[in-house]
Amino acid sequence: MLSISKRGREMPASPIRKLTPFADMARKQGKFIFHLNIGQPDIETPKIALDAVKNNHLIILSYSPSDGFESYREKLARFYRERSNIPVETEDILITIGGSEALLFSIAAVCDEDHEVIIPEPFYANYNGFAHMIGAKVVPIDSKIDDNFALPPISEFEKKITDKTKAILICNPGNPTGYLYKKEEIEQLAELVKKHNLFLIADEVYREFTYDGLTHNSILKEKGIEQNAIMVDSVSKRFSMCGARIGCLVSKNQEVIATAMKFAQARLSPPTYEQIASEAALKVPDTYFEEVKEEYVERRNALIEALRTIPGLKVAEPQGAFYCIAELPVDDAENFSKWMLEHFQFHRETIMLAPASGFYSTPGSGKRQVRIAYVLKKQSLLRAVVILKKGLKAYQKQHGIDPESFT
């Protein structure tokens, strides 16, 4: 009898996309959907990047080197040094097919089957999937909405470290929380990985999106963990180029780079035109980032203020990225999210949310939470909150839920 592998059967579904069939049906019913579930920015991709592809005169669309074009890696290293004061060179960078492949390569390079990776939760859902694909185990540490999802105490990490622990993985700023790690928190993690001889993997794809005068602290700037540190990055969010699928793995540890290179050779090469666009995008002026940040701050402020008018709803205030976690006055946020697509409309409009339970590894955690991406224009976000508020009232009435019980 034909059968699917146990690994395939147990591969977790994406909480970001798992409700897509319900959204497809809602659209067929004539509903307009405000997509709050996915981090697809509506900011325009820099024209210089698009023009680099449009005006290119390649006559053969050939393979690129497995580690990416050297010209792109050189300029990317310069970009890190000059813009973020991150001390890296061309040979420290391997170009990947999106940040996702860089994460997969990072975990695969340092973990064997049954090795453990400690991750503060909630975390980007695909971390679970990447670890599962290679047989590694995610060991979660709970961060709390009441603490704005700050780094849990280092003592909690110490309790989780075993002889199977190989790495600690963080996302900074955080997806799905929007939390921005303080310098002292990064320093604490650096001391911890030095003490226990672990790798520290940091997903830093939202580095440019920090608010309220706060700055990003890259692990690659920490002294003494040069051999421990692995950074993951991507053009997807920085330049609103999600469809380009260009990321990179960055480390001063040349054994890590050489190992990742073997994985890169097995998949041949990153895409050519997308690297051309990504290389061109590095020429955008600093004003580009400042304008984008201003736009996201305005959206964040409007969204958080509006959400806080909903009785019984709790929301953490993000300091970076473009997500927030909201705890809803319902018993099950996933059931509510499905119901909004299947059964609710306000003037033929509804919303699509990402149930946050899928961003946790601990069973039962985040059951009342959703992730909201504020990648829509301000007026659309405010309209979406109106629909959310009305939907919650209707759902609570239909299911006999007292919103006062959540305050």
Image (tube, helix red, strand yellow):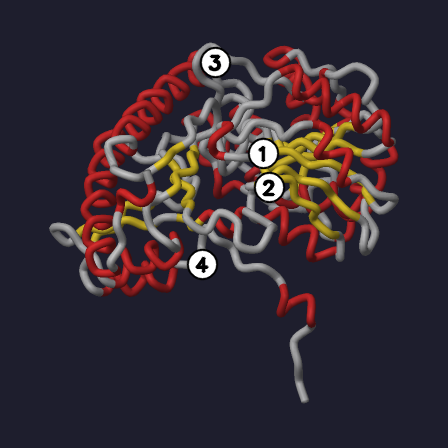
Marks 4 and 3: in contact by CB < 8 Å?
no
Furthest residue toward bottom: 1
Marks 4 and 2: in contact by CB < 8 Å?
no
Which quadrant holds residue 82? top right
Q: Is residue 238 visible?
A: no
In this view of the protein, which residue sits in the foreground, 141 or 282? Answer: 141
Dot 1 crowding, Cα within 10 Å, few <14, some 14–19, many 20+: many
Dot 2 crowding, Cα within 10 Å, few <14, some 14–19, many 20+: many
Which quadrant holds residue 230? top right
Of discs 2 and 3, which sits in the foreground? Answer: 2
Q: Is residue 185 left or right of residue 16?
A: right
CA gap between label 3 and label 4 equals: 38 Å
Q: Which residue is mark 3?
A: 285
Marks 1 and 2: in contact by CB < 8 Å?
yes
Q: Quadrant of the N terminus?
A: bottom right
Q: Which residue is mark 1?
A: 234
CA gap between label 2 and label 1 equals: 6 Å
